[in-house]
Image (cartoon, rainbow, N blue to C red):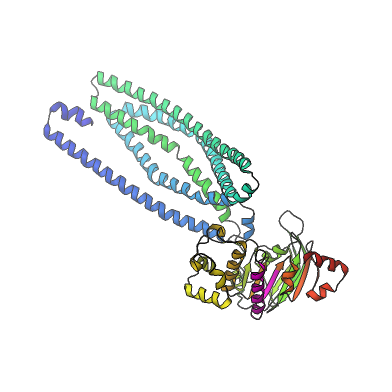
Amino acid sequence: MQKLIDEILPEKDLNKLITGVVLVSFLLLIRVFLTALRDYFSIRQAKDFNKRIINHFYSALLQLPKSFFDTRKIGELVARLNDTQRVQRVIQVVVGNAIINLLVTVVSLGFLFFYSWQTGLLISVSLPFYFFLIYSFNKHIIYAQKEVMRGYAFNESNFISTMQGIATIKNNNRQTIFQKINKLIYGNFQKKIFNLGKINVRLSFYSSLFSLLLLMCALIYTTIQVYKESMQIGELMAIMAIVGSLLPSVANLALIAIPINEAKVAFNRMYEFAAMEKENMGNIKLHVFESLIIKDLSFRFLGQSKLLKGINISISKNECIGIIGENGCGKSTLGQILQKFHSFEEGSIIINDSINIQDTNTADWRRIIGVVPQEITIFNGTVIDNILLGKEEKPESIISFCENYGFDKFITELPQNYSTILGEEGISLSGGQTQIIALIRVLYKKPQLLILDEFNSAMDVKTEQYIFNLLNTLKKEISIFFISHRLNSLNKIADRIYIMENGIISNFGSHKQLMKSSNYYSNYWSIYK
């Protein structure tokens, strides 16, 4: 542009004009090509980076003990995983824009000194003040960004927990209350965004004011030089254009610490749980189950009094034992300890008379046991998907399995049989159907020790009778650890029943033996009938 104004147009040289236009067009075309190439590599790098980092942190998340998830909100974990996008944006800024801004700054200063060393000196002296003016906002912006990230995680967690509990909210007519709670939480989140916005507005105002003053100084000086005929008009326009592109580049460099810190915060939020101690996986291989002995076992949740105190229970191959007790006495917690979800405080659990459960290979142990928990998880997929859980097998093998065990009569009641989409959390299933699906799932993996935790609570009488007949048959092949608060359930199948009260085993024996014991237990049994 400087050559066009100072030489080509005054000389009216058509050849130079055409050559200049072609050259500029060629340079602009190259810029378009390089910009497209940079954007392509940027999005490809973003895709590969996000896949790697999510895979790394998600894998680490799955390896954490269950107790970790018991104390965390799902929304918070989801928000932390989504923080990978912040890390990726910073990589794009640092690798792309920061390098370009640095090059623009260096080259622009070089051209300023080439055109006018006085102007170059003026800008060079002013730039450090401009840089530190913008840099002084970093601390405030970083703090505000942290608050926004916390607000975002809390808000997303509230959304998820509200949607999960929508039935309870509606049944209790608490829509208005939860609307007010959401308004408060979301309002607080938006307030933090507003506070960050105010800081950015102040930064924009002060930086724009400084830029204006610097541009005016440069314009006044170069205009005077044009009047003195020591500078050409084209050079003036070139200098002003260079200064105009230089200042935003310097401002971006001054603010580079903000996205870097944002990425650091996001990375630390993910790393916080990825670096936690992983689940104890054990190292002793185990392929066959013969017996399990729980000896003097005690357990407490962190910061609470003992829930289980000196528990002694044993179960052998092809045996069914029952655990009965009131809600909150520790029955289900004991079942979770057997699944290696919690570490106990005192005592021991010995497998096959010689192996401590903590030393067994966790993957091997979980292949040996099969669990139907109180709270059954149904995934958004077909019946077959929910039985296989990702395992690659032909549908015919599942159909044959269900027919052999008599489960096909329950499956055929569903709209599309084995292809029925069950919906998120099994929304299309009744409680009894959900428990049937869970039982099919666990029996299909061919466990050697079956842990049942109130697994029949929603079944009708006919279905329950069929299932107990099936379990009595299966006792010839597997061991069963049956947790319940219903005597009639245990009476049909248990070889030995343990009564749990206030975290201890108060009595045990067969149903007939317990019924012949003291009046206290007779009264106890009458309650649970």
**In this image, 451 relative to 520: left or right?**
left
Task: Name above or below for residue 529 compared with residue 23.
Answer: below
Which residue corresponds to the image point at 62% horizontal and 47% vertical from the top-left? 170
Which x, y percent locates residue 212?
38, 25
Task: Name above or below for residue 118 compared with residue 368.
Answer: above
Q: Does residue 345 belong to the magenta stretch? A: no
In the image, 446 versus 434, the foreground residue is 434
- Which residue is most to the right? 519
Q: Does residue 474 belong to the magenta stretch? A: yes
**Quarter where residue 3 is shown:** top left
**In this image, 208 relative to 292: left or right?**
left
In the image, 290 versus 527, the foreground residue is 527
Q: Note whether residue 390 is visible.
A: no
Q: Note whether residue 332 is visible.
A: yes
**In this image, 430 relative to 302: left or right?**
left
In the image, 62 versus 15, the foreground residue is 62
Which residue corresponds to the image point at 41% horizontal and 51% vertical from the top-left? 46
Which x, y percent locates residue 208?
41, 28
Quadrant the C terminus occupies? bottom right
Which residue corresponds to the image point at 45% horizontal and 27% vertical from the top-left? 205
**Quarter where residue 210 is shown:** top left
| Magenta stretch, residue numbers | 460-482
